[in-house]
Image (cartoon, rainbow, N blue to C red):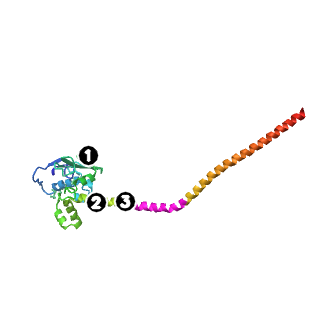
Amino acid sequence: MYLKSIEVHGFKSFANKIDFKFENGITGIVGPNGSGKSNVADAVRWVLGEQRIKQLRGASMQDVIFSGTEMRKPLSYASVAITLDNSDHVLPLDYDEVTVTRRLYRSGESEYLLNGTVCRLKDVNELFYDTGIGKEGYSIIGQGQIDKILSGRPEERRELFDEAAGIVKFKKRKDASVKKLESEEGNLVRVKDILSELEKQVGPLEKQAEVAKVYLKKKEELKSLDVNVFLLENDRLKGQLESVEEKLTTATEEFDETNS
Ligand code: ATP
């Protein structure tokens, strides 16, 4: 894998679109102080996802957009595209050539593209883990950085060694897993709380269930007793009706006899 080109447009001092091609061997960019040499390195850092504006020598992220000169109007966006030869597939992608693009508009809108397809900053970061190329990598050593590495805090130096040892990917994965585990542990505590709350309710609910069972049994009994009462009452009334009918027949006969 090697750097093939850097296309810069609207980034810092590069008002015109410029395409730096890198051939075999060493390429040097020379120029007087302030002519924009470090801006090339900044462009690489930026396209690889640099979020710390201090690292890009500005005050706000919008400072990376060409701010105009006496002769030229400011531009509305900055764009940098870095192309790497990936024929050896060091980058875990099927493509032989990988182009990462970052764009930022004055409105604050920004986007990353991987071979022309919009992607997340996370995808760009993960792509370069352990290659030494990422923004934390050791392949971009800016002015005064060697000194910073030597005199920096051990944790800062550690980042560089981790990247060189190729363990950043695993460390990040471990961090993500530990975070997930912590959140799962939090969930477990909540589930246990709910469980103990529910367990407290089990006793009274059992009692209520017993009462409800007895009630349902009694209700069934009442229903069948009601039916029996109805049948008995029915029989009694039928008997009464029969005797009344008999009496009526007798009375009718007596009446008929008296009248004849
Ligand atoms: P040195 O050798 O002193 O480090 P250099 O050649 O590396 O200098 P840089 O620091 O890369 O130069 O470039 C600084 C130049 O870039 C300055 O002229 C500055 O005005 C210009 N510049 C930085 N940001 C912008 C911007 N947003 N718009 C226009 N020009 C910019």
Quadrant location of residue 133?
bottom left
> Where residue 63 sits: x, y (%)?
25, 54
Q: Main secondary structure of the magenta part?
A: helix
**On the image, numbered disc 1 is attached to which residue?**
117
The disc label shown at residue 184, or none:
3
Query: Residue extending furthest left?
Result: 25
Local secondary structure at mark 2: helix
The residue that appears at 74% across and 42% down in the rendered structure is 238
Range of magenta residues: 188-206
Tell me the crowding category of disc 3: few under 14, some 14 to 19, or many 20 or more residues within 10 angstroms, Cα based.
few
Nearest to N terminus: mark 1 or mark 3: 1
The residue that appears at 71% across and 47% down in the rendered structure is 232
The reply, left or right, for residue 215 in relation to residue 183 is: right
Amino acid identity at mark 1: Thr
Tell me the crowding category of disc 1: few under 14, some 14 to 19, or many 20 or more residues within 10 angstroms, Cα based.
few
Pick the front one: 132 or 18: 132
